[in-house]
Amino acid sequence: MPRIRVNGIDLHYRLEGRGPWVTLSHALTTDLSLWDDLAAVLAESCTVLRYDTRGHGGSDAPAGPYDFAMLTGDVLGLLDALGVERTHFVGLSLGGMIAQHLALRAPQRIGRLVIASSTSRMPPATDAVWQERIAQAQAQGTASLAAATLQRWFTRPFRAAHPALMQRISALIAATPVAGYVGCAEAIRRLDITARLAAVKAPTLVVVGADDPGTPPAVGEAIAHAIPGAQLDVIPSASHLCCLEQPDAFNRRVAAFLAD
């Protein structure tokens, strides 16, 4: 399990393929395995770098709270350690939030940008929800979050038709250290970056599932409207983890955009 000391912690990462670099950043309470299908597609023409976000998977999970300066610093430290000067970047949910901050902090390092199932701002009304989730994780563990999370992340028909995948994602949620969940959740609940997105220079694709209750198409549209020249792609019959619910459509669109 390759790990590199970065920004004061050990980050777990994986490399596949050859060609231009593309970095993949996963959702909260998942790990780099979220990208198994997309990585296989992109590795045919790219060098694919996947990593476990601080607090997740095989990376260290120090006590938080975390913030996006820290999470983007982790990415930049990883790129530096691997000698990567410039990379395309694909982020989903929490990964999409990291993507936005990264494109603003180090525009010279980013080629093309894909922001999937994400948002640029947490409305004040959601703060109580995040506080409740944090308290639940601290009191009952991250496994207690799995059932409600799956309801948000996948449509009802898909959940019923794919029990093995539901078990796999439940296991990822349960395996997330409480410190990692709480640290990242503290960063997410304070997110407010919409007003800065006009400064993003990278060609950008925003992807969202048509049936996503957490980051619905209107939220993706707001990001695409704020970033000059950004494209918006709404994937039918998909909720939050559209990369798993409609993998063919998601992977085809992302691969085509990165190859443009």
Image: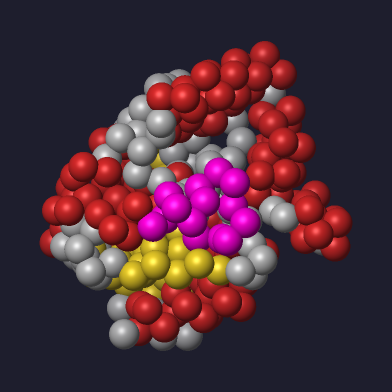
Count of numbered circles in the view? 0
Residue 26 within the segment the image draws in magenta: no
Residue lying at 55% horizontally and 44% vertically, measured from the top left: 214
Q: Quadrant of residue 191?
A: top left
- Closest to the observer: 241 or 1? 241
- Quadrant (top left/top right/bottom left/bottom right) for the C terminus: bottom left
| Position of residue 193 in the picture relative to residue 212 (left or right) | left
Q: Is residue 18 above or below residue 241?
A: below
Q: Residue at x 59, y 46 (%)?
A: 213
Q: Which residues are magenta?
A: 208-221
Which of the pair 20/153 is nearer the observer?
A: 153
Asked if one can make out residue 3 in the rendered structure from this viewpoint, the answer is no
Is 218 magenta? The answer is yes
- The quadrant the N terminus occupies is bottom right
Residue 201 placement, left or right of 52:
left
Answer yes or no: is residue 151 visible: yes
Q: Viewer-proximal residue, 83 or 105?
A: 105
Q: Which picture quadrant has residue 254? A: bottom left
Q: Residue 155's spot in the image, x, y percent?
A: 72, 55
